[in-house]
Image (tube, helix red, strand yellow):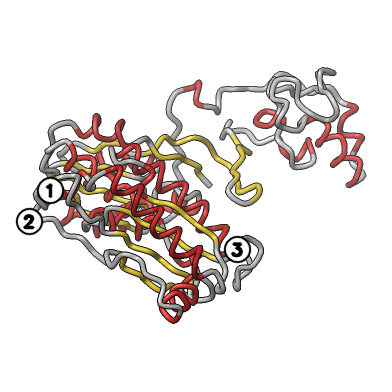
Amino acid sequence: MSKENYEPLLIAFCCQYCSYSAADLAGSMRLQYPTNVRIVRTPCTGRLEVEFFMRAFEKGADGILVAGCLEGGCHFIEGNLLARGRVGYTRKFLSESGLEEERIRMINISAAEARPFVEHINDMLATLKRLGPSPLNRIEQPKKQEIRI
Amino acid sequence: MIVAQRKSIPELMEILGSHKKVLVLGCGTCVTVCLAGGEREVSIISSALRIASRLKNLSLEVEELTIERQCDNIFIEKAMEAIDRNNVVLSLGCGAGVQAIAERFNKPVYAGLDTAFIGILEERATWTEKCIACGKCVLHEYGGICPITRCAKHMLNGPCSGSREDRCEVRSDRPCAWQLIYRRLKDIGELDRLKSVKAPKDWNPSIHGGPRVIIREDHRI
């Protein structure tokens, strides 16, 4: 796939207490953003583990956006702080494995921030377009590989 | 517990070389607790290896398994079939675990971790060394604080007088072990222990006398 006509697949893990509501609000406000974003609702970004991110990349995601509550505003006190560390750790693994670490990013927004949510999505998609398709998607998927989750 | 840390993915790829089928074998005991080689790390490292191999156009098949303990026959048996299925084992156990697997199977077994020390979780995500397994414990003399492990100069008759603001002069990020020993003995009313001069330590029970073996005749059949 050429870099010009490619539409990146972005997985957005959204905390149900903030960014998922922000995404919902964006819909209610009729704010437009590209359709190649897959929103996955999570009970808290602290539920997300490094292996979730790695598997998403293995299975063909071009990028991952982790959207948690504002720092200090986590419903579970420190879930978003845990997620911040895990996103950082994932970046380390990505760069060691040969993928660009900019393919994963964490943002902190509140439930009322529909416009910032859309801006973050567009910004992340612009980054992914600049990076081009995930190198894993340019290579044929192995047939026998067992991938859980 | 035994504390270890992972090797980098490029290092692991180099260790695995041209092998095509690898079993990443985790251990559910010490290295799980120190976040280096448990089920979660097996999953992450396996993913990273798959990604790295695909990017290099290598057809590496990675199987994942974690057993309760790699240093115990009963648990190793549970990994037999998976080990048979693969060409090589990448063990995420400590050095003892890697060797226990390697001794029992006639195929390459590689270490995926660097085993660091015997230590404890000092605070969140921080492990510190507490014991060098010298073979002859002297902790009772020093209020439960090991001068051999925790004093950079291993002084049995300290302090060295080089500490600054209770910090070690060799490692300024670590507390002076002798300061800790003095405070601890004072708190528990055993300062008198410091009045006697300790004889040089007998290092024969330590690793310097060769690999150590402990045999309990009463438990042998």
Amino acid beneath label 2: Lys
- How far apart, in angstroms, are the residues tagged by discs 1 and 2? 21 Å
10 Å crowding of disc 2: few (<14), some (14-19), many (20+)? few
Is A92 situated left or right of B63 in this image? right
Position of residue B199 in the picture relative to residue A132 (left or right)? right
The residue labelled by disc 1 is A1
Q: State the quadrant of the C terminus of chain B.
A: bottom left
Q: Is residue B153 depicted above or below B214 in this figure?
A: above
Left or right: A45 with respect to B126?
Answer: left
**Which residue is drawn at the image coordinates 89% and 41% (left, top)?**
B190
User: Does residue B35 show up?
Assistant: yes
Q: Residue furthest bottom?
A: A28
Q: Secondary structure at mark 2?
A: loop
Nearest-to-viewer mark from 1 and 2: 1
Q: Is residue B220 visible?
A: no
Q: Please report whichever mark, 2 or 3, sits nearer to the chain's N-terminal start.
A: 3
Let me know if marks 3 and 1 both belong to one chain: yes
Mark 2 → mark 3, Cα distance in angstroms: 41 Å
Judging from the image, what secondary structure is the residue with disc 3 in?
Answer: loop
Q: Which chain is disc 2 placed on? A: A
Residue type at mark 3 is Leu
Q: Amino acid at mark 1?
A: Met
The answer to whether mark 2 and mark 3 are in CB contact below 8 A is no
Q: Position of residue B140 (x, y in %)?
A: 75, 40
Question: Can marks 1 and 2 be said to lie on one chain?
Answer: yes
Q: Which residue position holds label 3?
A: A70
Picture coordinates of residue B181, whole percent (x, y): 81, 35
Up-down relation of residue B153 to residue B182 (above or below): above
The chain to which mark 1 is attached is: A
